[in-house]
């Protein structure tokens, strides 16, 4: 029987066309999560013990610059992933993320997700491919931001 | 016996003199001129441009950014980028200004009728889109969703900020704005405009997209529109090249087989894609 979480995951663009047994494996390590406005979702330097898939709401990815305070690097919205640091040792968040509006998300338990990946090479390949695509899009976006496209060319 | 008199020679390179009615400061380096055109009005279509002239300095192509339903006032938004635009930005009410045009082909807003009209603008690229948005909103019932996706460098550099708020307050239009660099009091979206293309509320299969901004932005925005499922021939871009005469005679703006000033500046992605990647020397 398909759970609500499985149905939500299966209907999400990030998991489009994924094998049902893989969706079930991911749903097994997932829980619903909610964050009120201003609530911290991840914190720089802390253990990256989760990965979030935003269903609704907006969150800000921030970094604290000494003397300037928190600077928003990017805002994340429905459909976005929050958190890569759980993928690679030392599993520590590089940025902060906080909810700008009420955020409804699916939280994946990172240690359990890593275990599931390790146990199933096909799931691992599937996930890494999907995450890689998102990472490439983020990298392209970061490069465009760095180019200062709208600046005067003088 | 009738005396045949030659009609007055057409002199398309001679500007007509208008008068600056008002100047609105938009951004630190950008102003909008409201010009009373010679002859009382200058009819134009959304997406067309004029050549604006300052005596003794030169001429530049500037897109018309006003409402096509109000031809009695020529509205042009100009950013300081060189000698001529600096002079234009220093104009005061009552000053004369040379105007040639309008030139170029228009945004085909009627192509979007019956479907969604999606406008994707970056920086000052919102200026050439604005007449098309006015035209669509003037016939709002003919369109399904109307969506504006706009990106700027920072919150201080949002062009037509008041207009964006007004459009955003409409129930029949969606306005999504993002900035490359947020600031402490900015609670809106931070990130490139291409990301808005991914999440904008429109039906890609029924969408006609109008894109204007720096060419690199247009390239990536077009790629995202295609990824979303918008048809290549339904994506229109406004190109900018070294336009001089305005009517396809001098060749300054020739790009491949096209003259941007007369064949464009509005092209479909299908017709312009190859030139978006070509290095211009």
Image (tube, grey):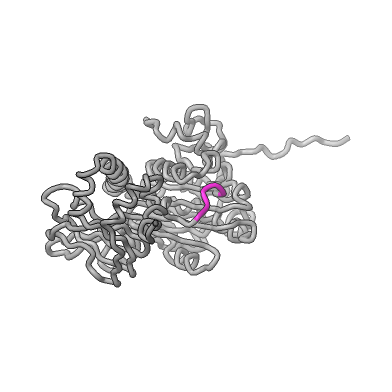
Left-right relation of A106 to B115: left
Q: Residue furthest right?
A: B1
Q: Main secondary structure of the magenta part?
A: helix
Quadrant (top left/top right/bottom left/bottom right) for the C terminus of chain A: top left
Q: Position of residue A128 (x, y in %)?
A: 26, 43
Toward the viewer: A52 or B181? Answer: A52
Which residue is found at the position 28% from the left and 43% from the top? A123
Left-right relation of B267 to A140: right
Q: Residue furthest top?
A: B257
Q: Residue furthest front?
A: A1
Residue B215, image quadrant: top left
- Tell me if residue A101 can be seen: yes
Q: Position of residue A58 (x, y in %)?
A: 33, 63
Range of residues picked out in magenta: B202-206
Q: Position of residue B119 (x, y in %)?
A: 49, 52
Q: Position of residue B96 (x, y in %)?
A: 51, 55
Residue A46 in the image: above or below residue B45: below
Toward the viewer: A11 or A149? Answer: A11
Toward the viewer: A45 or B153? Answer: A45
Residue B176, image quadrant: bottom left
Quadrant (top left/top right/bottom left/bottom right) for the N terminus of chain A: bottom left
Residue A59, image quadrant: bottom left
Does B77 lie within the magenta span?
no
Which residue is found at the position 29% from the left and 72% from the top? A36
Which residue is found at the position 55% from the left and 65% from the top? B172
Residue B254 in the image: above or below residue A143: above
Which residue is found at the position 58% from the left and 48% from the top? B16
Number of numbered discs: 0
- Tell me if residue B196 can be seen: no
């Amino acid at each position: 029987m398909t759970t609500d979480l499985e149905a939500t995951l299966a209907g999400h663009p990030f998991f489009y066309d994924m094998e049902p047994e893989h969706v079930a494996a991911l749903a097994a390590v997932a829980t619903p999560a909610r964050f009120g406005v201003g609530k911290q979702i991840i914190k720089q330097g802390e253990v990256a013990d989760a990965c979030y898939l935003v269903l609704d709401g907006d969150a800000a990815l921030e970094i604290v610059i000494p003397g300037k305070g928190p600077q928003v690097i990017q805002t994340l919205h429905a459909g976005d992933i929050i958190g890569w640091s759980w993928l690679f040792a030392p599993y520590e968040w590089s940025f902060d993320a906080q909810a700008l509006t009420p955020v409804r998300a699916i939280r994946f338990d990172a240690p359990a997700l890593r275990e599931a990946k390790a146990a199933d090479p096909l799931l691992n390949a599937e996930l890494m491919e999907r995450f890689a695509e998102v990472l490439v899009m983020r990298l392209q976006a970061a490069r465009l931001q760095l180019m200062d496209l709208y600046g005067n060319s003088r | 016996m009738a005396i045949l008199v030659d009609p007055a020679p057409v002199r398309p390179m001679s500007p007509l003199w208008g008068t600056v009615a008002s100047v609105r400061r938009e951004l630190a380096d950008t102003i909008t001129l409201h010009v009373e055109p010679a002859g009382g009005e200058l009819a134009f279509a959304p997406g067309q441009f004029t050549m604006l002239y300052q005596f003794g300095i030169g001429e530049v192509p500037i897109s018309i950014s006003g409402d096509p339903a109000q031809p009695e006032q020529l509205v042009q938004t100009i950013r300081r980028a060189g000698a001529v635009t600096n002079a234009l930005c220093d104009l005061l009410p009552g000053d004369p200004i040379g105007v040639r045009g309008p030139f170029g082909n228009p945004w085909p807003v009627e192509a979007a009728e019956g479907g969604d009209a999606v406008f994707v603008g970056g920086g000052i690229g919102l200026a050439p889109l604005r007449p098309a948005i006015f035209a669509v909103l003037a016939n709002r019932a003919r369109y399904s969703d109307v969506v504006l996706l706009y990106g700027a460098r920072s919150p201080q550099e949002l062009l037509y900020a008041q207009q964006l708020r007004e459009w955003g307050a409409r129930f029949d239009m969606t306005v999504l704005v993002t900035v490359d660099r947020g600031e402490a009091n900015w609670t809106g979206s931070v990130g490139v405009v291409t990301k808005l293309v991914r999440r904008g509320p429109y039906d890609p299969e029924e969408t006609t997209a109008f894109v204007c901004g720096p060419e690199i932005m247009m390239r990536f925005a077009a790629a995202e529109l295609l990824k979303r499922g918008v048809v290549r021939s339904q994506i229109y871009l406004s190109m900018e090249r070294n336009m001089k005469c305005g009517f396809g005679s001098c060749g300054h703006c020739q790009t491949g087989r096209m003259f941007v000033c007369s064949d464009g500046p509005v092209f479909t992605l299908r017709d312009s894609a190859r030139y978006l990647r070509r290095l211009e020397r």
